[in-house]
Amino acid sequence: MTTGKAAIAALVMAVPSAIEAQTRITPEAFLGAVQGKTVKFHVYDSGMLVGTEEFLSPTLSVWRMEGKGCVYGKITTPNGQICFLYDDDEDGLPVCWWPFLYEDQLMVRMVGFSRTEIQEVRNISEKGLNCPSAPIS
């Protein structure tokens, strides 16, 4: 086996079993489930809270990590992915996720072989983040 194939095989084996039994959903289905709501994202393996995101529209969200301020993000849906370009992204590159269901639970997996992080939605509420100066566009 070549080094490249060995590296890919190692990455695939390292991905949690949720990937194996996932049901991919469209970004539109994911956004339809969360639009107008506030969602808490947790790391699948550890259960650690990553942050909370309020989905203001299909193209705009606001993200807040615990203990930090609000950051607004533009949402796009290229190639079946959900991508977020946040106001504080220094590199100007969006963060992209594959949305899926696992045992009827909404989840996302980061796009790219080098980043296999999986997050699960543990709470969806109607309560907003109360972030100041929400952009209109």
Image (cartoon, rainbow, N blue to C red):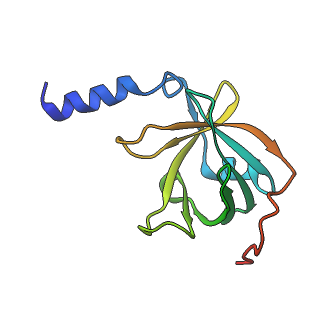
Residue nearest the observer in this picture, 136 or 28 = 136
Write down the quadrant of residue 40 in the picture.
top right
The quadrant of the image that shows the C terminus is bottom right
Coordinates of residue 51 in the picture (x, y in percent): 65, 47
Coordinates of residue 73 in the picture (x, y in percent): 61, 65
The quadrant of the image that shows the N terminus is top left
Residue nearest the observer in this picture, 89 or 107 = 89
Coordinates of residue 119 in the picture (x, y in percent): 58, 38
Outermost front residue: 67
Give the tally of numbered discs: 0
Residue nearest the observer in this picture, 90 or 17 = 90
Q: Is residue 70 above or below residue 28?
A: below
**Which residue is depicted at the point 56% across and 59% down?**
77
Outermost left residue: 2
- On screen, residue 36 versus residue 137, left or right, reads right
Outermost right residue: 126
Write down the quadrant of residue 22 in the picture.
top right
**Which residue is depicted at the point 74% across and 47% down?**
39
- On screen, residue 96 versus residue 71, left or right, reads left
**Which residue is depicted at the point 61% across and 41% down?**
25
Coordinates of residue 38 in the picture (x, y in percent): 78, 51
**Which residue is depicted at the point 54% across and 25% down?**
18
Residue nearest the observer in this picture, 137 or 43 = 43
